[in-house]
Amino acid sequence: MANSTPGGDKKFKPLPKKQIAYFEKRLLEERRRVLKELGHYDETFGNTPQGADGDLSAYSFHMADQGTDAMEREKAFLFASKEGRFLWHVDQALRRLYRHPEEFGMCHQCKGEIHFDRLDALPHARYCIECKQREEDGKK
């Protein structure tokens, strides 16, 4: 390749308004889904050990039950934090789309095009596949 940019021959052309509207709809759907999931986790965290299984007595559970409950709450917290990070990425993509729609779909590194298939799979993507692979290889 004679081109020295990481994106190579992928000159960026702004997305048509129809595709911008499509990605806006996709991002908003993802946002709603994540917020619904986070609401589910909020209910999980709000349960007290006594109320979790419907038993409202003040007697303590067996230690094994307490350990299982603690593990389940920890798992729910880990999933919720992952969903929270995903929500942040979706919100950032919506900000980019609303502030600079003419640049949505442009790789932040090489300024080339992020292919439609990649954006369709990950509408919040900031990098083309080549730059993302390069970034991940650099982290290893």
Image: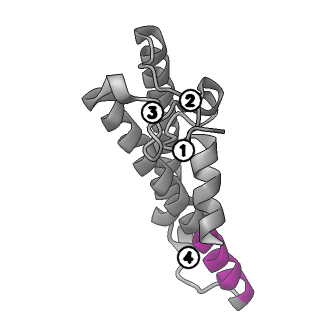
Q: CA distance from mark 3 to mark 4?
A: 58 Å
Frontmost of labels 1 and 3 is 1
Q: Which residue is mark 3?
A: 106
Q: Nearer the viewer, residue 59 or 129?
A: 129
Of pointers 1 and 3, the one earlier in the residue sequence: 1
Disc 4 vs disc 2: Cβ atoms closer than 8 Å? Answer: no
View extreme (front): residue? 2
Q: Which residue is mark 1?
A: 4
Q: Where, by quadrant of the figure, is residue 136 drawn?
A: bottom right
- Span shown in magenta: 64-75
In the picture, the disc for residue 10 is: 2
Of pointers 3 and 4, the one earlier in the residue sequence: 4
Q: Amino acid at mark 1?
A: Ser
Frontmost of labels 4 and 2 is 2
Place of residue 108 in the rendered image (x, y in percent of width and height, measured from the top left)? 43, 44
Q: Amino acid at mark 2?
A: Lys
Q: Amino acid at mark 3?
A: Met
Of pointers 2 and 3, the one earlier in the residue sequence: 2
Dominant SS in magenta: helix
| Drawn side of residue 85 relative to residue 128, left or right | left
Can residue 106 be seen? yes
Q: Give neighbour class at mark 3: few <14, some 14-19, many 20+ (Cα, 10 Å).
A: many
Q: Where, by quadrant of the figure, is residue 135 drawn?
A: bottom right
Is residue 71 a member of the stretch shown in magenta? yes
